Amino acid sequence: MQILPSPVASAAPCDSTSHIENPIRLREDLEERGYVFVRGLLPEALLREVRADIANVLARAGWLDPRFDPLEARANPGVGPFVESVSPEYAPVYDRILHLESFHSLPHHPRLVRLFRDLFDEEPLLHPRHIARIVFPNATEETTPPHQDYIHIRGSKNTLTAWFPLGDCPRDLGGLMALEGSHHLGLLPFVEARGAGNKGIVIKDFKGRWVGTDYRAGDVMVFNSLTVHSGSPNQTGNCLRLSMDVRATPLSEPVHPSSLLPHMQRVTWEQIYSGWKSASNQRYWEKLNLVLAEDERTAVKGY
Ligand SMILES: O=C(O)CCC(=O)C(=O)O
């Protein structure tokens, strides 16, 4: 596996916040750049609840420095770094996060669902396979490499990912970067690489800008499944980066069946739902008229 060079963001993303009430402009932004960046879309208080639930799991696992408020997500200096794609210690802790009701409820927030609806100009199917990223400091070689999500998600190429931090995420904590306009390149060849997803692409000649920013709690970056994007290294030395990936497909377009399973497929929906207070976000997709993608050869667990 290769360690691909982390790109460096040369510019801030174009900000679509002022178009939030204008679906046509939002769709134009997405078509032109391959992403839509909106500040303050999600309520900070709700993000804090999810962050607190995840921090509680991490504190119990001993990953957090007990001298600090768990909400600060300070890494325990004697533990880790543990990495999603390679450390056996990661999976049992991550699977506890996958049980959290708050984690699965947040993506149903009406403002996020409406953004997907406006960008598709039709009803979205929110994939239930939500992903949390717990990114340790001092593991920069495991930074998510530049890649296209389509390799991992399949289904419709119009699938969108919403990436957002669960709290403020200044650049040195390692937020998401996107290569502006790269969705126009189509599907690119990939190589096996270190970092989440384990697949990366090497881009040589494309002239687009890498965009990244100091994300604040509530900001959301939504991008097309062909848009090349990457993590940036967590260079804090002592803080964990907590963030989420939420995907959606236009309801009339194909979704790969693996997108309807819990992330990593180590736990079942029944296990996840046991202990939840509300049933309203459970198995909601089974009541919808879905178009399932025929190509099941590439069912992916890891993304
Ligand atoms: O958060 C990360 O490091 C990677 C996120 C990502 O690549 C994705 O959402 O597809």
Image: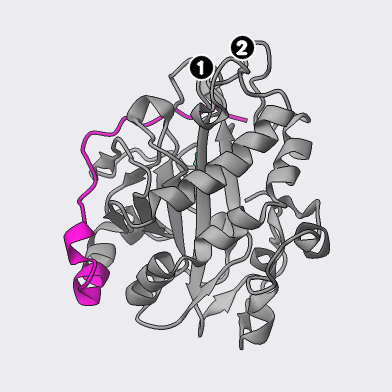
Q: Residue at x 24, y 68 (%)?
A: 26
- Residue 183 in the image: state x and y as whole percent: 35, 58
Q: Residue at x 34, y 38 (%)?
A: 204
Work out which residue is located at the far bottom of the displayed protein and give it: 289
- Residue 302 in the image: state x and y as whole percent: 67, 49
Residue 133 image-quadrant placement? top right
Q: What number is the disc on residue 77?
A: 2
Q: Is residue 197 visible?
A: no
Instruction: Name the amino acid, label 2.
Output: Pro
Instruction: Name the amino acid, label 1.
Output: Asn
Residue under pointer 1: 238
Residue 113 belongs to the span the image colors magenta: no
Q: Residue at x 27, y 41 (%)?
A: 211
Q: The N terminus lies in which quarter of the figure? A: top right
- Residue 115 in the image: state x and y as whole percent: 36, 69
Magenta residues (range): 1-28
